[in-house]
Every structure is written in structure tokens, then in C-alpha cells.
Amino acid sequence: MSGQFAYISGVGQSQIGMRLERSPLLLTLDAVNEALSEAGLDISQIDGVSTYPGRSAGMLGFSPIGADELIDALGIKARWYSGGMEISSQLGAVVEAAAAVRSGMARHVICYRTVYEAAALARPDEYPMQRRDRVDNYSQWLAPFGAISAVTWTAQYAMRHVKKYGLTREQLAQIALTDRANAALNPRALVQESLTMDEYLGARMISSPLCLYDCDRFSDASTVIIVSAGDALDEVVCQPVRIAATAGSVDRLSWDQAEWMACYATGRALWEQTDYTVDDVDTVQLYDGFSFQALAWLEGLGFCGVGEGGNFIEGGKRIALDGELPLNTFGGQIGAGRLHGFGFAHEAVTQLRGNGGARQIKAQPTVAVATSGGGPLATALLLTRD
Amino acid sequence: MVHRALPRLDRDNRAFWTSGESGELVLHRCQSCASYVHPPRPVCRTCLSENVVPEAVAGTGEVYSFTVNYQKWHPKMEVPFVIARIQLDGVDGVLLTSNVVGCDPESVDIGDRVAVEFEQHEDVFVPVFRRVAS
Ligand SMILES: [Zn+2]
């Protein structure tokens, strides 16, 4: 059976910081080395590389290292590689790698996401932004109206929930409060201080109904997930985690034409690929670039009905580390830093292996869901420890 | 708001961004199945007809959703202001992101009735919306 599936072997992560001096290539190397070490693999055994979104020349901090550059820089003998933005969001790079190892195009694929947004913003002389005199593509339908940040796009979906379903600030706060409580137990997390309800309710609005603490923070970091073929697991020393199912979708590549964010279609599609059900899931690691996205993922994946997310997380007990469905146990992007999607898969694997340290879920989880995106693009992974 | 990033005009989008010169809001529409095609492209995503042309729409509608933006994303940006998705009368399947102008930002709500007006910036006529009595 193992031959039919793709597995996650090593996972690795660099330090997570703001305005780091260490170069993004070396942060990527740190994460690669940690993942190789966990898997017991040597770089010479890596024959594939996969990333999202590839090198972003116009905005280097967003994605400074392309797949082909990493292959060249680390001397990887790649038989297969992929790096690009036109896939179903960040963890789509892991889905592509899984397809590659299942079809025999590669045996061990380094999947990575390196971000350098805090450093690039602070040192534009080193990481210059490409200046554009005019906007085009889908930016043209948003930016002329001052809707230049994803928070203003996400906020309008959140506002529908506030007005249609009665989502309250106290309910939504539970995502940030849970993230920050968990981040305080994660030595690598960017933010180490927990957050109180009073602090949340007193925070300044960024784009209503989303306040400062509903937003993740630019950070500098790299995260690596090694995807290995089922028939290559004898080369791996760590507990393999099976990629039991994947789903990804785009309907309208747009933050305004779609009535529902893509997490709803992707959440439904995930369960069509597997015999597992939501009742089998022990922990969820859900994209939270903005808190509302995690709430929408809970609804989209079917943990509760559409519009019921606010009630589902009310009080925070259910999604707490010792609750029935621990959420974002590493702190999510709101607590751990904007790792951009890969942090969720990294943490799911960490928890399934029992390597969470102070933040390890007490009853050893065996089934986890990790997601990325959720706006116009979405990816969901079902990960199991067999 | 004051400062607006402007679209680069091209073959597909020029009608949308310049029709305000004559005071009309236009959207691409399929002449075969009557669906609106937005963003504007030369094929209908509903029936694949290539008979898609710009057509004037009513220019009135209601607020489908909104946010009040408080963050100064740009030094020249004046905050707060309202970003809204507008459901235009008679136009199914299109939600237009725009601004609701000329009112207290905090007073805007889903369902508010609005009408289009245009702000000219260089060669671009940006459609924004003002509240009207329902
Ligand atoms: Zn048509």
C-alpha cells in the first residue's frame, strides 16, 4: 500500500524573526538541513524541488529564492522541479510534489517556502521593490479603490458573517487568543506574549471588522517539507506521515467575484478523496493570515455549518491545546509569524510525530488537516500517522 | 482617499475604465446568453460565445458587503474610507469593488442603496458610489 502514497519525511524550519541579517538563501539552507537531518537523508538523495510562488522579482521579500536557484545553489541533482504561482496556493507545492513521487518522477522532494518580508521592507536598498506606474491583471479591480491589502478583501467576507450570521468580535477573537496562547509555548514563534480579550477588544481597527490582532505579521523565515515516495521510505529514519488526501481549487481568481472563498469548495472536496471524515480529525492547522480565514476553513471543512463558525469557537475551549479540536498549536501565522502556508503542514507533522514539546497535544494525534490560502485559492492536506 | 493607483489600459479593460467620460458605467455582456462578463474578456464564461461587447448598465445598486479601512497603506491615503462590493441592479453574477463616498464611513451598511459617479484621474474614469434614498 505504501507505494501508492506520498509521505512527508523530514520537516525543517529556520529561525523566525523580523529584519534578520541572515540571508534568505541561508535561512532556506537552515530549514533544509534540519529537514534532512530529521529524515536521515543526505542532500545527494534529494532529486526534486517544489515551491510556491517561485522567485518574485517585483517583490523580493515575498519570495526571494526560486526553485531553480535553490537547485543551483545547493548542488541538488533534480530530476523534477516546480516553482510557480499558478497553483492552488502555498501548499499546492506539496500537492505537486506528492504527484511527482507517486508517478515515479522523483523519490525525495524538498518543498519549501522562504519569506523575507520584514527584512526587505526595512532594507529596500538590498531588496528593492519594482515600481509600477500603473496596476493591471486582477489588481486593477481592487487597488484603484484603496483595496491594496488582502486584509481589506478578507474583511468584506468577514463583514458578511457579522451581518448575516451575527459573528461577534468576542467570537472571532478566539482565533487570535488561541494562536497567541499556543505561540507562547513555541520557542521559535515570532510573538511570545499571550493576548487577553481586553487587549483584543481595545486594539485599533485595520479594516473593519478586522483589528490589528486579526492580522499576521511580516517575518523572515524558511520552512521545508520533504515529500518522499512510499517505496523510498526504507531510506528514511523518521516516522513517516502519510499524505492521505489532498484538495485544491480556484474558481474565480479574484477576491471580489466569488460569493464564497475557495476554502468552502476545497474543504468539501477534501472528503471526497478519502474514507476519513471530519470526526476522525484530531487537530487542525488552518491558514490564518487573517483570523477570519481560519474560521471560514472550519466551516468549509465541515467541522460546523456555514455561518456557525462563531458559535463553534465561542469561549475558545474547543480549539484550545487541551480542547477537542486543537487549532494552530504552533501559534498560527498570527502568533508564530507569516510563514505563508507552510507552517501549517510543518506543525501538523510535528504534532503527528509527538515532537511538539511544551505544545504537544496530550492525546497523541493520528489524523490532522493542514491548509493554506482560502481566499481565491485554497489547498487542504489530510495527514495521517498510520 | 485622494491617492488612487490607476489601471493600465488595454484592449480588454479600456471600455470599463473610460466609459465614465460619457457618464455611463459599462460592463462586457454576452449577446448570446445575456450573462455579464467581468473582468472583461472576449469570451463568455457561461456559454463560451465570443459575441461579448461592452454595454451600459443602470449604475445603481446596493452594498453587498463592505469594510471601513482605517490603515494608511500609503502616505497620501486619507483614512478612514469605505471599500465595498456593489451588487448592481439588473447585473447578476458581478460584484464590483468600489468606494462608497460622501457619507460618514461608519454609517454604511449592507443593503444600502447606491448610485455610480465618476472621478477622473488622467485618462481613467474611476466609478465610485454615493448613497441614495431607498
Ligand atoms: Zn454567454
Image (cartoon, rainbow, N blue to C red):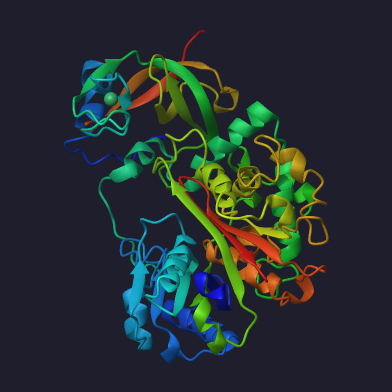
* Residue sitting nearer the eye, A44 or A158: A44
* Residue sitting nearer the eye, A323 or A26: A323
* Residue sitting nearer the eye, A131 or A382: A382
Q: Answer above or below: position of A264 versus A6.
A: above
Report the number of numbered marks: 0
> Taking B76 as reference, is A179 left or right?
right
| Residue at screen point 29% across, 18% down | B34
Instruction: Single out the residue that lies furthest toward the top.
Output: B134
Residue B27: x percent and y percent?
28, 24
Residue A213: x percent and y percent?
65, 51
Instruction: Single out the residue that lies furthest toward the left.
Output: B11
Quarter of the picture for ligand 1? top left
Q: Give residue B35's quadrant in the image.
A: top left
> Taking B10 as reference, is A278 left or right?
right
* Residue sitting nearer the eye, A230 or A201: A230
> Taking A87 as reference, is B105 left or right?
right
Instruction: Single out the residue that lies furthest toward the front.
Output: A1
| Residue at screen point 48% across, 66% down | A94
Residue B94: x percent and y percent?
39, 27
Q: Is residue B134 visible?
A: yes
**Is the C terminus of chain A in the top left, top right, bottom left or bottom right quadrant?**
bottom right
**Is the N terminus of chain A in the top left, top right, bottom left or bottom right quadrant?**
bottom right
Q: Answer above or below: position of A43 versus B42.
A: below
Q: Is residue A202 visible?
A: no
Q: Answer above or below: position of A64 versus A164.
A: below
